[in-house]
Amino acid sequence: MNTQFWVVQAFNGVSYGALLFLVGSGLSLIFGVMRIVNLSHGSYFLLGGYVALSVIHATGSWALSLPLAAIAIAALGIVMERLFLRSEGFEVVRTLVIALGLAILFTLAFQKWQPHIVGSKSEFAIVAAIATVVIYFLLNRISIVPIEADVLRQVLLTVGFAFLFQQAALDIWGGNNMDINPPPAFTRSIVVGGTYLPLYRVFMIAMAIAIGIVLWLVMEKTRMGAAVRATVDDAQMARGVGIDTNRISMFIFALGAFLAALGGVIGGAFLGIYPGLDFEMLPLAFAVVIIGGMGSLGGAAIGALAVGLADNFGKALFPEISYFTLYAPMVLILAIKPTGLFGRE
């Protein structure tokens, strides 16, 4: 193993860490601000890649796919947060959507049991509509604990959305592995000290640094950033001084989905896009958050760098136990400082 080997592996680890920063920083902010255990965060990464593929197919522009895919998934994140992860606001719409989903499941089961009663599409629609009304009124009479106070409901709800998003992606885009092809200019390599470094990975690192700087400036130098930091420190006190924490939560959730989707577009060029990628990225994002600490951008950057380097060097030096070396930094941090490197008690 010469010097070039260590340089190449370190470069690959840093570039992979740059990708993990995009996914992990958004999840860290969602954790820190909303205290929501969002197990569907990896789905935003996957859907971002698939939407980018559709944009590229329709327009032929890879550059255009970056903002469009990220904005589309951010909008999806806002809908999910407003309807299902908030106990106040849009109660009627939320209950109606849940009632409709349960009614469709009931009607499908009834159709299997009594196919002669629910045979046509019009009969199916009538039975589903009646079941929706009945279930809606039943749900309105059930007293439900606010989701912010029930971690189990957060886990079950978001993991349910993760499976729904995965199945939707499978139905829409199929189960084949797909690659996002960047412009030809990014397929070349540059020579640094006699070592060939892929230009696309250099772009990934530069993109992560640029986004990290913008996020830091917003969080540290703007009024919105001050409100976000106050909400992370003490949401109840922040509400007491007049900060609209609901709006902050919506902004952070949309930002987290935006960053994850952007990571899906960028990462799709060398990871590929395929069913199951969401559940592969999710534990890596959680490892980044655990190492760095909730709500800390600096912690997310260091955590992403640690996970990226551990993953790359683990696969290169210890392929038999690479999965262990990947999560070794997380275990070490949990043993020394359970709140993460920059997490607050």
Image (cartoon, rainbow, N blue to C red):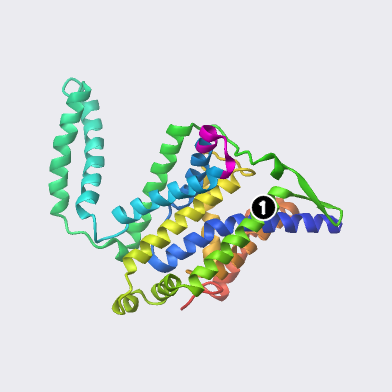
Q: Nearer the viewer, residue 229 or 214?
A: 214
Question: What x and y, as percent, mark residue 269?
Answer: 62, 43
Tell whether 152 sits left or right of 271. left
Name the residue: 16% across, 55% down: 142
Name the residue: 64% across, 44% down: 270
User: Based on the displayed image, in which of its 4 quarters is residue 185 positioned?
Assistant: top right
Question: What x and y, as percent, mark residue 29?
Answer: 46, 65
Q: Please give the residue where the numbered disc 1 appears in the rendered image.
A: 203
Q: Nearer the viewer, residue 50 or 323?
A: 50
User: Based on the displayed image, in which of its 4 quarters is residue 117 positioned?
Assistant: top left
Rate crowding at label 1 as few (under 14), some (14 to 19) or many (20 or more) other CA atoms within 10 Å.
Answer: some
Q: For residue 59: magenta?
A: yes
Q: In this rendering, does residue 293 appear at all?
A: no
Name the residue: 60% across, 39% down: 180
Q: From the image, give the main secondary structure of the stretch colored magenta.
A: helix
- The residue range painted magenta reads 55-63
Figure check: 106 above or below 202: above
Figure check: 79 above or below 269: below
Q: In this rendering, does residue 202 appear at all?
A: yes
Mark 1: amino acid: Phe
